[in-house]
Image: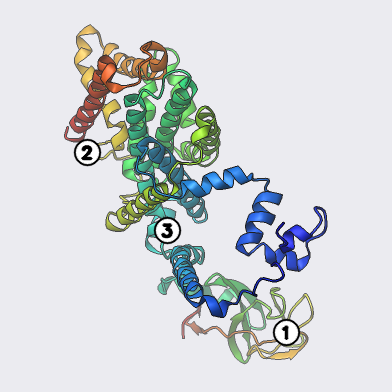
Amino acid sequence: MATTASNKRKPNEPLGLKGLLHWFTPTGFREDVLKKRLNISENLLQKFKQNLQPKKKIRLSAYIGWTIVFVFLMECFTGMFLMMYYHPTVAEAFANVRYITNIIPYGWLIRGIHFWGSHIMITLVLLHLFHTFFKGAYKAPREMAWLSGVILLFLSLAFGLTGYLLPWNQISFWAVTVVTEVPMAFPYIGHYLKLIARGGENVSQVTLTRFFAMHVMALPALTTFFLVLHFLPIKKYLIPKDLITYAIAILFCFGCLISLATLSPAPIHDKADPFHTPDKVKAEWYFLACQEILALAEHLDFLGSWAPKLLGVIIQIVIIILLFLIPFIDRNSARNPKKRPIAITFLSLSYVAFILLTLMAKFR
Amino acid sequence: MESGKPKKSYLTTTRRVFTNSLMGGIIGGVIGWFLYPIFRFLIPPKNINQDSNIVKLNATEIPVGKSKIVNYNEIPTIVIRTNQGLFALTAVCTHLGCIVNWDEVNQEIVCPCHAAKYDLNGNVLSGPAPKPLTLVKAKIIDDKILIGEA
């Protein structure tokens, strides 16, 4: 039996300062802190140690998934710092963002990481969705992982939309004005939906406060909840099989964030002017496909003046419902992409359509 | 450590100690490299717009013998007008940070918290204040009092 300082001691014996110092040695940390106090089993520690060694086979989906969690944490972290200087008021918001970017030491870096983090997060979520579909990982019994994953995609988009307004510049103000005007397509309830989104007839101080509250309180809480729900069906993968590769993936992502923040700083634009609309109002790239569907639906005006906007919105709602129902529509139990030609064709066409619509809106 | 085994000495594991120290140094450096921007971000810079730092008051706002507390560079500053001239000093007591008052009768600056007393040049006359108050440049031009300008 080993006679280390920790083993000599009785279980409930007070540690004393010497015992505390022992925590900072490798043995003390392992025996006293991890095993005795945090109740981590020897098996789990061994598994962790084995997973530190690089493996030949790399599971791409696990790295994308965990990298998304890392980017989400980075967004929380940088967002917390930005909140220290940001006041969500019409009078101050724009000046605060300019102050953070131009005056505060490394403010440009923190804001740049937050700005690019949102883009990278949505890109990775879309990649993760693609990969999950490709591998058939949404099939039984993983339906809950798929459903929560789709909800997380929409939460990421909601983060993008609510965060977009916060700098209170011309581009963000008018993009949000256009997006919050979309619910007006619905007869009867459209006006109420717009009032709920904006907190009034126009985008104003109330909208800014609403979006800020959603961005920093409601959405992070909901995202955390659905992340837990997302992980429960796949909890055996919670410790990545190959920690070193995972660490490299995260470092690579972090490097990308810093490089983008440095080489292409987050823009400031002009202060929002509610009495002057810029020439071309465009949403962020991840909303461009939706914008283009609405624009293409304009050709349906031969059906009546009500048709273009309403049908444009209904098409998008149908796409969203289909996305949720995929695990229940696809009843083929095979996961191998080669044995699912229809599903893979559908996936490829969907992504091609998304990219095409985005490009069409971009160059319109 | 079991008895009977030779006592481990760091002198006999020089290469391990060296490698560990090197790794520790590199990891520490990387952590420092990450933490430095955060540390700098948390400390807001001083106001760099010098022109806006000058506080302008009408001379009638401070009659001779009276004083006024103004905000100069985000620091409460006491402006005192006496027969000897115009004086401006930081109004934050160097003892525990209370805002000082001008005692017109005794012609001295007094802290209401622990009765530290200063003269018109900020020097400590009595009380617990460890350091004098800092003088701020001030002058009267025509009927304007300018604080922050020589």
Residue at screen point 60% across, 82% down: B89
Secondary structure under the numbered disc 1 in the rendered image: loop
Foreground label between 2 and 1: 1
What number is the disc on residue A279? 2
Query: Which part of the image, by quadrant, shows the N terminus of chain A?
Result: bottom right
Q: Where is A71 relative to A10, above or below?
A: above
Q: Amino acid at mark 1?
A: Ala
Residues at badges 3 and 2 in contact (C-beta under 8 Å)?
no
Chain that bears disc 2: A
**Residue in view at x 67 percent, y 91 percent:** B123
Nearest the viewer among A165 and B4 is B4
Residue A71, image x, y percentages:
42, 45
What residue is at 67 percent from the left and 87 percent from the top? B131
Q: Residues within 10 Å of mark 3 (few under 14, many from 20)?
A: many
Q: Which numbered circle lies on residue A222?
A: none
Mark 3 or mark 1, which is nearer to you? 3
Between residue A322 and residue B90, name the one nearer to us.
A322
Q: Position of residue B36 (x, y in %)?
A: 46, 67
User: Which corner quadrant holds the C terminus of chain A?
Assistant: top left
> Disc 3 marks which amino acid?
Ile
**Residue A330 picture location, percent across and down:** 36, 13
The local crowd at label 1, few if under 14, some if 14 to 19, many if 20 or more residues have their Cα within 10 Å, is many
Label of residue B129 in the image: 1
Mark 3 residue element: helix
Query: Disc 3 or disc 2, which is closer to the eye?
Result: 3
**SS category of the residue bearing label 2:** loop
Q: Label 3 vs label 1: CA separation?
A: 37 Å
- According to the image, label 3 marks what residue? A100
Q: Which chain is home to disc 1? A: B
Residue A241 visible, this orientation: yes
